[in-house]
Image (spheres, grey):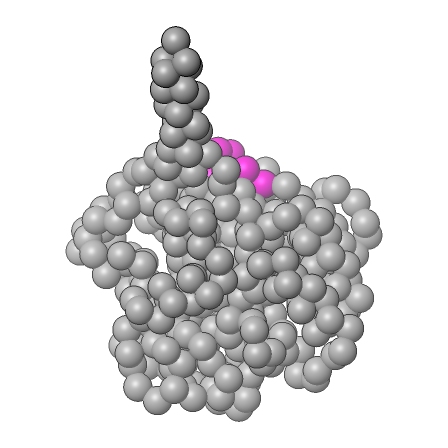
Amino acid sequence: MKNVVFTLILLILLASCTNNSSQISFSKSDCEKNWALCAVFPNEKVKLYSPKEPVKVALLDSGVNSSLSFFKNSSIISYDAINNKPTTTDSLGHGTAIASILLAPANKRTVHGVSPNVKLFDVKVLNDKGGGDIDDVINGIDWSIKQDVDIINLSFGFQKDDKKLKHAIDKAIEKNIIVIASAGNTLGLSADYPAKYQNVISVSSVDKNLRRDKFAAKGKVDFVAPGVQIPVLTHSGKLETVDGTSFATAFVTGIVSNILSKNPEYERKDVLNYLKSTAKDLGRKEDYGYGLTQYD
């Protein structure tokens, strides 16, 4: 009887750890509509995992219009770090565009979100003009830490270092949170903060020919991802094509989410090793870091 009970307990535990998966495929036509997806997913067929406990991604940005139909099946929790309230608005559209790269379901315009199975924490830290106050960003980081997120996406930056910001970033990293930030559109000059911090994954952008965008930062660059002529969905639900390291950062965040979904036991060092091992070498480290981020 004891053996039977033990077997049942073991089966229950195994069932609770089951990592369901789904497969997405990309045709030549899909790649023509959205070259970026086929750049980061080099195989025609990609397996995406849905763990019992979804990967938690904090998107610190201008907010997300989560009422749009293409987010209806997504798990989104919002927090306005500027006004300290549990709802956000996005009049700028930047945050919603980033979210569409991560979450948008398959459709004729965006093809497929990079990591549609994540739980998104929409944290508004940028105002409707795209400006951000350091204290609001820190508030957003602190709130994200309390939510026990796995990843923080920062698709913006500041030209100057700030001790308080670095302290907040360091606190997140100490909690084993992976912080991913855009290197910035600095016309080929050095990266912005917080991407410039040592333990933050800094992302610059490349075009369809896998060359660094002339507007993208170089120097402290860890990886690159597609960031030119990227189709996104706006806060009004319309299709737009955008450029910038902000959007490249979203692709890296999506890939890291997929890595963690497949390997929930991974820590930051394991994720970095995976990214390095699968990245496509494109040339000079100051331009491309370890290379083009890919997920297979």
**Residue 204: x, y in percent?**
45, 76
- Which residue is located at x 51 percent, y 74 percent? 202
- Which residue is located at x 47 percent, y 80 percent? 221
- Which residue is located at x 76 percent, y 54 percent? 81
Q: Residue furthest front?
A: 2
Which quadrant: the C terminus? Answer: bottom left
Q: Which residues are magenta?
A: 70-76
Rendered image quadrant of residue 284: bottom left
Left-right relation of 65 to 103? right
**Residue 18: x, y in percent?**
38, 33
In the image, residue 69 sits, relative to residue 210, either above or below, namely above
- Which residue is located at x 75 percent, y 42 percent? 86
Residue 194 visible, this orientation:
yes
Residue 74 is a magenta residue: yes
**Residue 42: x, y in percent?**
23, 61
Q: Nearer the viewer, residue 203 or 239?
A: 203
Which quadrant: the N terminus? Answer: top left
Left-right relation of 248 to 48? right
Left-right relation of 207 to 154? left
Residue 92 visible, this orientation:
no
In the image, residue 283 sits, relative to residue 266, either above or below, namely below
